[in-house]
């Protein structure tokens, strides 16, 4: 599965901030941590802020804090902020043919499984994975 | 913290009622048939002795060409008592029973649209297993 860059950065940022909700990190801090563009991260943090998941960011050095619920927010909630909604996709040429329709059903099946996986993993689950239960 | 113990015949009316409230389908015979020694049927009780939830499972040997694994086939928590770790307590208690028998894997099957129960099992550390379930409509 390939995620757009903004989606991946959104997941990096929210998970890093959710690791410690008391902590404030700027887009530059996060960019350095993950070795990615600070400019791109600033835009992504703006999207997360508009969604009410993080707060802060005033001024050039302004930091962000996680303000969501780790046990409720899933990976899908973040992915949905950056990726086009599954139903909003434009029809591809050839989709109305028998072969095009059959291919579409296979792709839909894959999308449904991916959505189920992303929707079932909360930030809390991600952040505790590997520590054992 | 809830108290976890094996289910008894006297628990069946409360188990069946909790399940019927959640699923909309009453199936008392199904729950009664789970009360057999080869199955694990555990309940969680509040400090006042009320049913907080239950879990059921069994060890299935060499099914589908796979080594023996502990299967979880039902888990239900009273919605008023969720988010308090009762489900995790039940899951841990069932897994402990499986481990006592030398089983090293736990498995379940979940509707992929049921994100609530999927999230619960994910939170217990479960991930997609080696098998893909396939279906065909025969109507």
Image (tube, coloured by chain):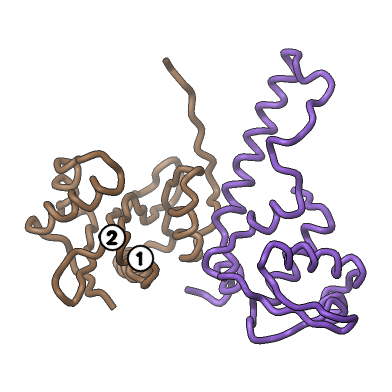
* Residue annotated with mark 1: B82
Residue A48 location in percent, x, y? 73, 65
Residue A110 location in percent, x, y? 65, 38
Q: Are the residues flagged by discs 2 and 1 in contact, CB closer than 8 Å?
A: yes
Q: Residue at coordinates 68% horizontally, 58% vertically from top-left?
A: A78
Q: Residue at coordinates 49% horizontally, 51% vertically from top-left?
A: B115
Q: Is residue B101 visible?
A: no
- Mark 1 Cα-neighbour bin, 10 Å: few <14, some 14–19, many ≥20: few
Tell me the quadrant of the picture where the N terminus of chain B can be found.
Answer: bottom left
Chain ID, brown in image: B
The hue used for chain A is: purple
Q: Residue at coordinates 48% horizontally, 24% vertically from top-left?
A: B136
Tell me the quadrant of the picture where the C terminus of chain B can be found.
Answer: top left
* Residue annotated with mark 2: B78
Residue B83 location in percent, x, y? 39, 68
Q: Is residue A65 visible?
A: yes
Pointer 1 chain: B
Q: Nearer the viewer, residue B100 or B57?
A: B57
Q: Nearer the viewer, residue B40 or B111?
A: B111
Q: Residue at coordinates 15% horizontally, 52% vertically from top-left?
A: B35
**How many marks do you count on the picture?**
2
Distance, label 2 to label 1, CA atoms, is 7 Å
């Amino acid at each position: 599965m390939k995620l757009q860059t903004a989606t991946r950065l959104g997941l990096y940022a929210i998970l890093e901030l959710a690791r410690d909700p008391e902590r404030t990190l700027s887009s530059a801090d996060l960019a350095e941590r993950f070795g990615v563009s600070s400019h791109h991260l600033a835009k992504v943090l703006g999207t997360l802020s508009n969604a009410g998941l993080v707060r802060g960011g005033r001024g050039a050095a302004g930091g962000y804090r996680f303000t969501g619920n780790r046990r409720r927010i899933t990976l899908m909630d973040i992915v949905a902020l950056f990726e086009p909604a599954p139903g909003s996709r434009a029809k591809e040429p050839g989709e109305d043919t028998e072969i095009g329709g059959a291919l579409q059903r296979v792709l839909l099946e894959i999308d449904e499984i991916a959505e189920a996986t992303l929707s079932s993993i909360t930030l809390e689950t991600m952040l505790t994975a590997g520590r054992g239960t | 913290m809830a108290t976890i113990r094996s289910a008894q015949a006297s628990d069946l009316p409360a188990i069946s009622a909790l399940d019927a409230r959640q699923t909309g389908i009453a199936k008392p015979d199904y729950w009664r048939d789970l009360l057999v020694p080869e199955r694990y049927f555990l309940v969680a009780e509040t400090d006042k002795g009320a049913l907080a939830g239950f879990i059921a499972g069994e060890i299935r040997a060499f099914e589908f060409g796979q080594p023996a694994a502990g299967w979880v086939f039902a888990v239900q928590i009273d919605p008023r008592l969720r988010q308090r770790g009762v489900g995790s307590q039940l899951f841990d208690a069932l897994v402990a029973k499986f481990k006592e028998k030398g089983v090293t894997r736990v498995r379940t099957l979940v509707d992929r649209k049921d994100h609530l129960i999927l999230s619960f099992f994910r939170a217990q550390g479960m991930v997609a297993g080696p098998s893909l379930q396939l279906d065909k409509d025969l109507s």
